[in-house]
Amino acid sequence: MNARLRLCFGFILAGLLAFAGCSVLEQGTQILGQAETVVEKGEKAVDTAKKLRSAFSDFSEEEEYYIGRSVAAIILGQYPPLNNAALNRYVNKVGNAVAMFSERPEIYAGWHFLVLDTDEVNALAAPGGFIFITKGLLKRCPDEESLGLILAHEVGHVVAKHGLQSIKKANLTQAFTAIGTEAIQAYGPAELAQVTSAFEGVLSDIVEKLITRGYDRKYEYEADELAVNIGSGTGYDPNGISRFLQTMVGDKSAVSGKGWFKTHPTPEQRLDRVKSEIAGLQTVPSIAVVRTQRFKSAVASLK
Amino acid sequence: MKISKGTVMAALVLTALCLGAAADGWVVKVQTTALRKNPQFYAPVVANLKAGELLTQVSASGAWLQVKTAAGATGWVHKSAVEVPRYALMASAGGARTQAAASQAALAGKGFSKQVEDAYKAKNKGANFAGVDRMLQVKVTPAEVKAFLDQGRLGATGGAQ
């Protein structure tokens, strides 16, 4: 190879190397650039994480359970449970059947249902899957479909976290501030007092909505919608809820005092919405005699 | 452009974590659940799972995830029983000590806990916690629900998701 050719090769090689080098450099820069973006994203993610504990949905499944336990304890401090193991077991089967067809079949400590020994017409759902139905409401149910749809309505409240959504912003902030971010085995006395006070604020917001004032109408309508979907998904005739609501139309005794119709929209308003919801279903299951029979024998002991 | 080695390392670690943890890592969020042989609540139980247990996704079918446990068992869990371990991911992104602490707090169930309930209970004698505990004792197994659905000719339209 002569000198000129060698020089030429040299140039080509240098050019190739330079090109390759540039390319590598470029790629390297790109990678580093991407790395920076990733780091930025990481930092943003960490910032987001700080903000994560600010909304009702940021309570962990376990925290929701502990909130629900206390709300349930307050309810059971006001209404005694019905001492009827067989009936409670039957209600738990209907409730667990519909819960299985909800968006949240699995919940921290499982779904639990209980009949309350009062003639008030009411049903209540505490966060975490604690659901109550009064003897008075049960006596008004004409069939298992109605009971299934009412329990699906309550399951719907829990699935959509309507209880946690009732917590006022100030109490949410107080709660997340008191809880803090440090991992500790147990709270010291001063911190415990702060966290407990925040806990009380959270509970009082939920109980006020649940028992005294009632959820916002939009939540009740949403729960009815969910009831129609969950109920019909389970195989229940969704008109069961209409058959129950119909028994309430114009009934002043059920609307007065504490109870479901003190805290819910009127039966007429709900009937209208439920009707159009059912009209939108692809398949509407029919009522079955076998279910009505087992319902009648389960509630036969109620007086 | 000036980028320190540390930044690049952090970026690589973060990328690996993003790819590894976010894509197929899950953590059990309910107190207990079952790893099942098939994607159905009444399918045979392969193993029992507890809150905080980490799982790796193998595949998915509807609302069910096929996962592998740390012990190597493979089976199905319903997606409502698990969540993405987001706090763990954030915490590992590097240097975020507070977030690491937050993650442990969240994963260890700190915040509103048994200790807080006990403090509340001591101040509020009217709340009936014994009644709540009795309510929790009534349990209906998936097999019982299945028998109840079958006996009542239910479950045909939707199928337990």
Image (cartoon, coloured by chain):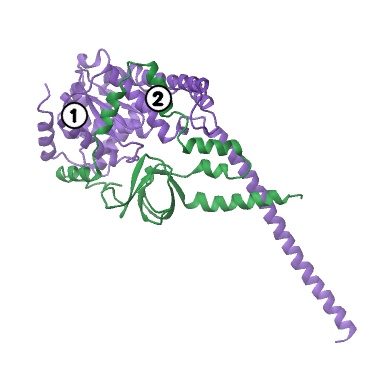
Residue A220, percent from left and from top: 33, 26
Q: Secondary structure at mark 2?
A: helix
Q: Residue lying furthest bottom in this view?
A: A1
In the depicted structure, whether residue B14 falls above or below residue A160: below
In x, y percent, where is residue A235?
22, 42
Q: Secondary structure at mark 1?
A: helix
Q: Which residue matches tag 1?
A: A243
The colour chain B appears in is green
Query: What kind of residue is marked 1?
Result: Arg
Determine whether, in the image, residue A139 is placed left or right of residue B1.
left
Q: Which chain is purple?
A: A
Q: Residue at x 26, y 46 (%)?
A: B158
Amino acid type of the residue that numbered disc 2 sits on in the rendered structure? Glu
In front here: A38 or A200? A200
Numbered marks: total = 2
Q: Which residue is mark 2?
A: B117
Query: Who's the residue at 43% across and 27% down the image?
Result: B115
Chain identity of mark 2: B
